[in-house]
Amino acid sequence: MPLAPPQPRMPRIILIAVFVYGLCSAPAFAQQQNDSEHQGARAALISLAAASASLQAYDTYSTLSALNLGAVEANPAMRGLARRPAALVAVKAGVAASSILASALLWKQHHRKSAIALLVITNGTMTAVALHNASVLRSMRESRR
């Protein structure tokens, strides 16, 4: 969930993590020709699912941390939830679970490229949100010093 205010600088470690994440997940699209490649694609799907859960967890943490420092939820649809930490955690867990379950269903129906693409797209979106939240959280912490 995006927070306000935006900050132009991002921590270097986050940029490196996003770069490494991109390198690890990009080859998954090419892996579906034979059994050994099938195993590689399956491993990519599992990694992407774990990343999805981690990104949702970080989004929850960074949102609640920034709100505690005085930030305002930028997404009007999530403002009510942001005031209720338990509800926010439940919704974020549901979002992570639904994208992971949807990709698993696509995988079982032999739509393997679509399963991987779904998680790549959702994780890319959540990575952008996480970077934004990290920037806002950092600026909020620096302004309190």
Image (cartoon, helix red, strand yellow):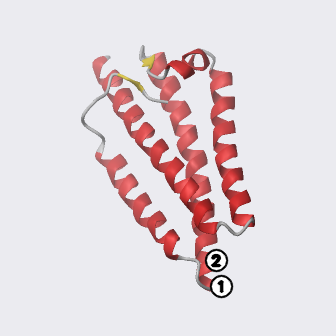
Q: Nearer the viewer, residue 138 or 92?
A: 92
Residue at 24 percent of width and 34 percent of height: 8
Q: Which residue is denoted by mark 1 in the rendering?
A: 35
**Residue type, numbered disc 2:** Gln
Q: Is residue 145 visible?
A: no
Query: Is the C-beta separation of discs 1 and 2 under 8 Å?
Result: yes
Crowding at label 1, few (<14), some or many (≥20) Cα neighbours within 10 Å?
A: few
Q: Nearer the viewer, residue 11 or 123?
A: 123
Crowding at label 2, few (<14), some or many (≥20) Cα neighbours within 10 Å?
A: few
**Residue type, numbered disc 1:** Asp
Q: Which residue is denoted by mark 2 in the rendering?
A: 39
Q: Which quadrant of the structure image shows residue 108?
A: bottom right
Q: CA distance from mark 1 to mark 2?
A: 6 Å
Q: Which quadrant of the structure image shows residue 118?
A: bottom right
Percent of width and height locating residue 111: 66, 66
Residue at 61 percent of width and 46 percent of height: 53
Percent of width and height locating residue 89: 65, 30
